[in-house]
Image (cartoon, rainbow, N blue to C red):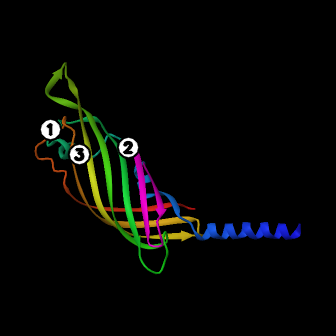
Amino acid sequence: MKKFVFIVIAILFSSTKNAQETKKNVVKINSLLLISNIYDVQYERVLNDRSTIQLGFGIGRTNNYDLNDFQELYLDFFGKTLNNPRDTHHRKEIISVNFDYRHYLRNHKAPKGFYIGPGIQYMKYKERLSALELESNGHSDNEELYTEQIKQRDLELYNVRALLGYQFLVAQNISINPYAGPSFVFGDTDESFEREDENLTGFGLNFGVGIGLVF
């Protein structure tokens, strides 16, 4: 009986040790995007000692009222400004999906250490600006007259990127993953958005700090 108990304990210890040594999954959230009320969750899966793939999904919404830079935003989106706007409101909604490949460099085994790799991200934006605009000659009994102005545009963007980062494993179970890299963005707008000089192609910078669990 004692021999049997010893064998069972040895098997359990061996299984636990192997599980600790072969952590192949990381689930994390981009902590920097939380500032903008965007929840971006990433799942990374180890393929071998040097390679992983990562899938991600993000969703968020922001609501800003009485903006100081409303005229600048409106001009940037629609090529014109409003006449003394008030009760301004800017709402933005975003959904994103991404796929990334990571190649880990020498000295560490994935998912720990320096890595570099390509990725692609799909983003769908919906932006809505509204305000009350003062009519140019709108006075009735010495009262100013305002009309409501609402503009909305939908954007679908593709973000092709190359990321360089380092994934720290704290106590073997916590991931801290800062990263950054250049990207090329292209896409189009909804048909209801009419502005001929709108340019949706350009270069950008991706960066973030992922924090999560390793198992």
Crowd band around label 1 with a 10 angstrom C-alpha radius: few (<14), some (14–19), many (20+): few
Disc 2 element: strand
The first of marks 2 and 1 along the sequence is 2
Q: Marks 3 and 2, Cα distance to the nearest angstrom?
A: 15 Å
- Answer whether labels 1 and 3 touch (C-beta < 8 Å): no
Q: Is residue 118 visible?
A: yes
The first of marks 3 and 2 along the sequence is 2
Q: Is residue 49 left or right of residue 161?
A: right
Q: For the point 38% across and 43% down, which residue is it?
A: 62
Q: Amino acid at mark 3?
A: Leu
Q: Marks 2 and 1, Cα distance to the nearest angstrom?
A: 24 Å
Residue 157 is situated, as x and y percent measured from the top left of the image, at: 26, 49
Q: Which mark is residue 73?
A: 3
- The residue beneath circle 1 is 194
Q: Is residue 30 visible?
A: no
The first of marks 1 and 3 along the sequence is 3
Q: Which residues are magenta?
A: 38-60
Q: For the point 37% across and 60% down, which residue is it?
A: 100
Q: Is residue 52 magenta?
A: yes
Q: Quadrant of residue 173?
A: bottom right
Crowd band around label 2 with a 10 angstrom C-alpha radius: few (<14), some (14–19), many (20+): few
Q: Is residue 170 magenta?
A: no
Crowd band around label 3 with a 10 angstrom C-alpha radius: few (<14), some (14–19), many (20+): some
Q: Which mark is residue 62?
A: 2
Instruction: Identify whether 66 is placed above or below 160.
Output: above
Instruction: Identify whether 61 is placed above or below 51.
Output: above
Foreground: disc 1 or disc 3: 1
Q: Name the foreground residue: 170 vs 55.
A: 55
- The residue sitting at the top extreme is 141
Quadrant (top left, top right, bottom left, bottom right) of the N terminus: bottom right
